[in-house]
Image (spheres, rainbow, N blue to C red):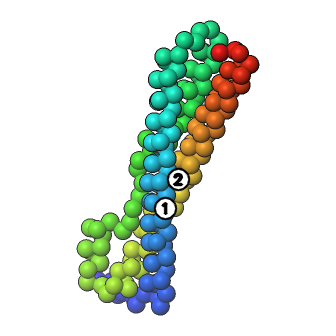
Amino acid sequence: MAIQLPPPPGAEQAYDVAAAKLADQLKQIDSLDQKLGVVIGAIVVAIAAFAAAPLTGWPKVLIAVGLAVALAPALAAFLVGQYEDAPRPEIMVEYADLNANAMKWQALGAVLRAFEINEPKVRNKGRLLNISLSVAAVLGLLVLLGKGAGLA
């Protein structure tokens, strides 16, 4: 058995801050997923309305392509589901012979790794949501301008 040094005095604070940041990150992921669900639902409703519209020719093609382009990034962002959470319960069982401060010190690395692994996925999810919203907004504006100009 290896000799265990006592954790540094700030170990508990370091763990608590990192764990809070990871919890906030996981809440942000849930929030983005909820927004993506709303966006996907709205685009699907727009697709249904579009399918029932009496459009022909290039306006129909333009709207169909626009809806597909708006839907694709939202679906891609929504389907990302592999996020890290730490510490895993079975790891904490291994640390059961340590005091609470030492347990947190041992688990801190896993919490920091989980946050680091999730961060680019969260940024990408947000970026894809923004792309989807932007395309949908531009498409909506084009449809309104086309209707105003008597093109559709």
Determine if residue 8 is in view.
Answer: yes
**As displayed, is residue 129 above or below residue 24?**
above
Q: Residue at x 47, y 91 (%)?
A: 9
The residue indicated by pointer 1 is 25
Q: Is mark 1 on a helix, strand or loop?
A: helix
Mark 2 neighbour class, 10 Å CA radius: few under 14, some 14 to 19, many 20 or more: some
Left of 49 or right of it: where is 150? Answer: right
**As displayed, is residue 73 above or below residue 49?**
below
Q: Which of 41 and 71 is in front in this view?
A: 41
Q: Is mark 2 on a helix, strand or loop?
A: helix
Q: Are marks 1 and 2 in contact (CB under 8 Å)?
A: yes
Left of 79 or right of it: where is 92? Answer: left
Q: Residue at x 53, y 16 (%)?
A: 53
> What's under tag 1, amino acid-wise?
Gln
Q: How far apart are marks 1 and 2 (CA)?
A: 8 Å
Q: Which residue occupies the extreme top position in the image?
A: 57
Total count of labels: 2
Q: Residue at x 47, y 54 (%)?
A: 31
The residue indicated by pointer 2 is 122
- x then y, percent, for residue 98: 30, 85
> What's under tag 2, amino acid-wise?
Val
Q: Which of 11 and 81 is in front in this view?
A: 81
Mark 1 neighbour class, 10 Å CA radius: few under 14, some 14 to 19, many 20 or more: some
Determine if residue 135 is in view.
Answer: no
